[in-house]
Image (cartoon, rainbow, N blue to C red):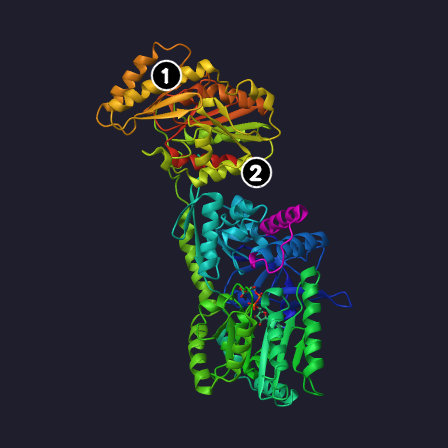
Amino acid sequence: MPSSTSRPVDDPARPGHDLVVVANRLPVDSRTLPDGATEWVTSPGGLVTAMESVMQTVDSGAWVGWAGSPGQEPDPFDADGMSLYPVRLDQEDIERYYEGFSNATLWPLYHDVIVDPEFHRTWWDSYVTANRRFARTAAPVANEGGTIWVHDYQLQLVPRLIREERADVRIGFFNHIPFPSVELFSQLPKRNQMLRGLLGADLIGFQRESDTQNFLAAVRKLLGYHVDGQTISVPGLGAAPVREVVAQTFPISIDSSKVSALTEDEEVRERAEQLRRDLGHPQTIVLGVDRLDYTKGIRHRLKAWGELLGDGSIDPQETVMIQVATPSRERVEAYRQLRDEVELTVGRINGDHSSIGRPAVSYQHRSFDRRDMTALFMAADVVLVTALRDGMNLVAKEYVASRPDLRGVLVLSEFAGAADELRAAVMVNPHDIDELKAAILRAMAMPVEEQEEAMRSLRRQVMENDVQAWAHSFLQRLEHSGASVREPKPTVRLTGESATDPAALDAALDTFAATPRILIASDFDGVLAPIVTDRDAVRPDPAALAALRDLSEMPGVATALISGRALDDLDAHARMPSSVVLVGSHGAEVGALPPWMQAEVLDSAALSMTPEKDALLASITENLRQVARAHPGVEVETKPSAAVLHTRNARGRGGHNATESALEYAVNLPDVTVTPGKEVVEFSVVHTSKGAAIETLARASAADAWFYLGDDVTDESVFGRLGENDVGVKVGGGDTAANHRIAGTEDVAAVLTRLADLRREG
Ligand code: ADQ
């Protein structure tokens, strides 16, 4: 981009823009000249290469990004028909947000942990602050109803931050690098904040289908949101609408015809020929072009090359390798190490195999302009793309676009996104050095007809699917997904009696979440899991469990499940981490407590069986078994301090009759607590209730207020104890003392997730 076209934007009342691109870097970098003046030069990297040509086709476009130098940002200015809005990054932001969290945490994690990601909380804080700054610069720049397109892993929180300020704009996000599997992504501290940040967008684009699927799996598993195909329902509560967010695959490309046209340029052709002459007319030129990055597999390539020279498979008198390695992230330790290793290896190979005037590896640690780059591609008989992991890899496509003569062979790693499209390349697993060596030899020896056939197929792909087509399909999809904000889906539905509206529940949750010390507890069957005929086949909702798990890890929050099930049984089905307290048998059995809870408060309420109680329980159990034998389908469950009659599977009036008989018998029993529930009656020889349990837990956790979700009559003992600051939510129909109600288990996850969000944000 020529520097001379820039001029300051000095009109504060200037109109906004229809399309605003937000990326970490502006397409130009500022450089201060010796005389103090500022010079602008094109900034490096795949994103700028791709988006620059797209922006030149847009009438009212703006680009928000960092200008490449620390300190005070320059004023906004126009260049090449685009308005540029610089964002300030000072030295500490560069170290923590950019070199730290972006390039030493996210980059390695998203690239299959080729090097170990580092996690530091100060880096995260700086990532949040910097993302805020980008969002604050971008939000006011877009026209009413305009489009904001956010790019790449450095800015994953920006979509949500903009959404909070601008409900009217369409927001797209494109991830240029891979999105890792959920197992890897789960390592990321703040992973849920990252997902929520992205979900502020209407459309989230990825390079490969596997990236899209990984993202959807993460949203499903970690946030528990409903995913239908590519569409995610991002829940809100109360008056907030449910937003539909689409995740889709859009493989990026290059300005193919522009690159191809450069090959017609006489001067570029001459440069390509000069290159071959300068290298002493080798028979074969093999080329690698990469940012000097450990993801690009440069070490593997050099190893294979060194071995091929060493074992005599390649004659250094006839063959030259050119390795262009653009300087990159030179202050990040892993990159410094990589540079040392690469340069050491190149030195060794050249020491062993070069002759005067004929290097075995011509190593270029610098930038080339587009014309020189095209000349290099035109001169190369083989191009090696051996990335260990790469979002797309534009170099592969640039090589293909530079070969209208249909000559040349592309060796392509199956771990580069381009491998999904460029099927006619020589595919390779770069981790397998033997396979890589064989692929290089095969490429060097490929007959001309075979080269032409492969290149024709590759060119069809690259020339038809250029970067303009990519941008067009993304923006069109975004335009259609912009209408995705719907009226509240019945995330929280009301069913009548004593119900409050969702807004009231939302407000109650808001206040509750802001209370310093809270206890959040829930029944299990009929709340976290739908009621099923076979009690052992119960399947809790993973989203609800995930939200509860999230809550259990937050400071000032105690969490518990309080169930009629025996403790072991509850434990086996809920599979909660130890941070969630399990209470079984309606409060008679209490599981392990987190160390910070006051165990002594609970001790007095814990299960205390005596020989008399044992005998009483045995006789109750025997009686219930007799009742069950008389009524097919009726079952008896035994617990440490109770026996339970289950009538859910009884036929006809069998359940009713069995319950009648059991209750009639119980009337005459001393010291037995009879608790009828949904198609179940419990006979307990210990005097407890869920209500007593919640009180005890609230005391043990020193909670200022508690929250409880329950569906059964047994939960009414909890709701009956609601204090002024407590929140009770009845799940489903029926009389209740609870102060709020939701329709059924399908809404529970939304409530718990909302609570987790509110608490986290608070
Ligand atoms: P990068 O990791 O930067 O991009 P890549 O896709 O190969 O990787 O793009 C590099 C670009 O820089 C190419 O256009 C290349 O020609 C150019 N380049 C490389 N070395 C150069 C040099 N010495 N001089 C001049 N130009 C040079 C990220 C992701 C990729 C994804 C792109 C686009 O990591 O996977 O393909 O974004 O989405």
Write down the residue under mark 1.
619
Q: Is mark 2 within 8 Å of ligand 1?
A: no
Magenta stretch: dominant SS? Answer: helix
Is residue 1 visible to us here? no
- Determine if the magenta segment contains residue 133: yes
Q: CA distance from mark 2 to mark 1?
A: 54 Å
Q: Residue shown at 58%/89% (left/top)? A: 283
Q: Within 10 Å of the Cα at label 1, are there few (<14), some (14-19), or many (20+) other Cα atoms?
A: few
**What mark, if any, has residue 761 been given in the picture?**
2
Q: Secondary structure at mark 1?
A: helix
Q: Is residue 362 above or below residue 298?
A: below
- Determine if the magenta segment contains residue 230: no
711 to the left or right of 391: left
Could you tell me which quadrant the N terminus lies in? bottom right
657 to the left or right of 333: left
499 to the left or right of 336: left
**What mark, if any, has residue 585 been given in the picture?**
none
Which residue of the protein is positioned furthest toward the left in this rendering? 652
Q: Is mark 1 within 8 Å of ligand 1?
A: no
Sequence-earlier tag: 2 or 1? 1
Which label lies toward us, 2 or 1? 1
Which picture quadrant has residue 585? top left
- Residue 280: horizontal and vertical position, in percent? 64, 90
Which of 617/696 is in front?
Answer: 617
Residue type, numbered disc 1: Ser
Q: Secondary structure at mark 2?
A: helix
- Residue 39: horizontal and vertical position, in percent? 69, 67
Which of 488/433 is in front?
Answer: 433
Residue type, numbered disc 2: Glu
In the image, the segment drawn in magenta is 110-137
- Residue 23: horizontal and vertical position, in percent? 58, 58
